Amino acid sequence: MIRLIFLMIARAMQDMRFINISQLSGNLSMEKIKISILALATIFSIGSYAQSRFTKDYILDTVLSQKSTNRLLNFPRADQKKINFSTTSDQADLKRYEVTIDPFFMKIYNQKAIDDGYKTIAKSIRLEDANNLIQPGMQLFIKEFSNKFGIEVRNVNSWLSSSFQMETDADTAEFILNQDYILSIKEVVVGGDDVVSAWANIPAVPAPNSEMLPWFVRSVNADNPTITPSHNIYVLDTANNIDMSSEVNIVSYAEYTAESPATRQNYSSKFHSGYVTQVIGGKSNNLYGRGINPGQGIRFFAIDPAQNWLAESLKENLNKAAGLAEVLGEFSVINISSNDKNTSRLQANNTWNDYADKGIVAKKASNRFLITQSAGNYSTDACLMSYNYQGNARLNDAIIVVGALDMNDQIMPEDNSPTSFPGAANSDLGSNIGRCIEAWAPGYLIYGWNLYNNTFQTSSGTSFAAPIVAALASRYGNNQTRPIEREQQILNNRYAIPGTSNGAGDVLRKAVYSPVSSPIARFPISSLSGSLGNVDINSLKDEKFYDASFFYNPGAYSHDVILDMGVIRKVRGIRITLRTNAPSYNNAVHFTVSGSASNSTGNSFVMTNFTEPTQFDFAPIYIPMSGDARYIRISGTNTASWLAYSEIEVYGVY
């Protein structure tokens, strides 16, 4: 009887374009029945508003009316999407899922939202309020989705992905996955081994009578000259409820979405984030210790100090940071002094692998940020705990993992002093080592003011080495200096420490400040053209990466883009930000890059053939090459998705 009633409701809803009855499975859950009844009740009980919602059903209008005629819409088949769909729950249990919307659907849908008056920034909020920066399409979509399915939406992301989280049962999640406009659904498993990478040494040391120039500032040549960049640096760290304005210059603060009992009163929050920000920008004010860049503006993004929620809040706030930088039109450095403890010590279990959750988000954020990350404090291989590309560091990915040194430029040793806050790494182990660490910096016995108990003390950890490198990188250029340029500046100015070993066949290479300019520069693009048309092609040089509507998609698996730089340049690489709806990341993208000094087709000689083995929406691909050219032709093929880009950058030497 219940099934008969449900099918009658479903048939009525199909007639009203709410569902496609052919998509219904034989096993009907109570959640599906609830969804259908709620949706139907919405139609009949709200009167004129329901009719208004029906006439403005943008989801169905975008999918059903355009899917057969608009070649820009190319949805993966349902069976392809289900390859990555899995759940650990019983079918009837409520679980949390992350839902990602198809980017090519969102390109059209976002424009509909803009046309309907939606804006990224509402008039009632401050520009600095990153918690409220949601693109128009996502604002409209979450309203329509909630009305359509009767499910509460939370943790909305609209920059590094068009995604949100929901709680429902496995049957309903699979039913929603079958909708054309949904790209993927995966269960959110809360927990993990994420830790902050530091410990505090007890007891506290006497506070200086006047301002101290910490040894780590001198060690990296940051004391002569003293530099305070005019642009801001970004920090992603544990939340803090203490006014730090006397010691550091916090210009904006974005909170995490409170999901756990932990609060900003947590000891680790105050201690860890206070120390990290002081290392970067401790003020020159005749008190305590000076930072690398005294008084530099810090945009702070708080992550949940509770270990169970650290990973999810970290991804959420990387999205907020990228969105704020995009809206403000600035490029910067962001420091992340956290890593995966990975107690199993298996490479496959590291959530910072380039194909794993946090690694993917970091890659996407590297369009706008040079990312510095702590290597971890377990005297083991950093590749098991920090960002890595297939078990190695990767040049020109704008992500630098940092190991810690002591005062003698040796690997930070073991330390048996007691740890003073929960969630910290074990205090009896030294810095991680290995081939995934690209830069080393001081991290042992770092002086600072402990905001938790208002004492001056020393602390150790790669948590403090990473922000030193971040601050050094931030000294170069301005808020338009690209992450790749900053990365090259740091790597090019490292000091090779004689007689040392990183545990992987190389010496320790210490980051130090040098006024020498970056060995590479970004070249401006004068004009672009495409083999399949020029609609939206200027989006490839508009310095925007995450705009849901404005990116280049000619609707094909293969096509060419020709760049004109105006004059002949010594090209050393191209960075392309990919847009894709490939149902699996394990699909290659192939490129042939040709160049010419005078032929406007850019087809005089082949500069390189390059294959990127994996693909993620918004994740940049750096193609190394060497040649002199004015015109460059990029011939690409992506057999798993329409080949689409949001930005192209050209790098080389003058």
Image (tube, rainbow, N blue to C red):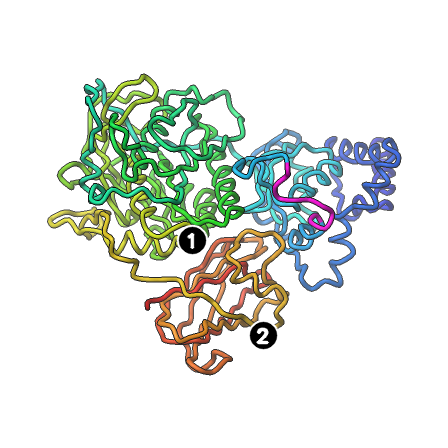
Q: Position of residue 250 (x, y in %)?
A: 41, 33
Q: Quadrant of residue 172 in the image?
A: top right
- Residue type for callout 1: Gln
Quadrant for the C terminus in the image: bottom left
In the image, 597 versus 479, the foreground residue is 479
Q: Nearer the viewer, mark 2 or mark 1?
A: 1
Rounded to the nearest angstrom, the CA distance separating label 2 from label 1 is: 30 Å
Q: Is residue 358 magenta?
A: no
Which residue occupies 83% across, 31% down? 2
Going from N to C along the chain, the mark reached first, 2 or 1, is 1
In the image, 297 versus 549, the foreground residue is 297
Is the residue marked by circle 2 packed among few (<14), some (14-19), or many (20+) residues within 10 Å? Answer: some
Which residue occupies 38% across, 72% down? 569
User: Which residue does the numbered mark 2 point to in the structure image?
Assistant: 531
Is the residue marked by circle 1 packed among few (<14), some (14-19), or many (20+) residues within 10 Å? Answer: few
Q: Position of residue 632 (x, y in %)?
A: 46, 73
User: Which residue does the numbered mark 1 point to in the structure image?
Assistant: 480
In the image, the segment drawn in magenta is: 113-123
Q: Position of residue 192 (x, y in %)?
A: 43, 32
Whether residue 469 appears in this view of the structure is yes
Mark count: 2
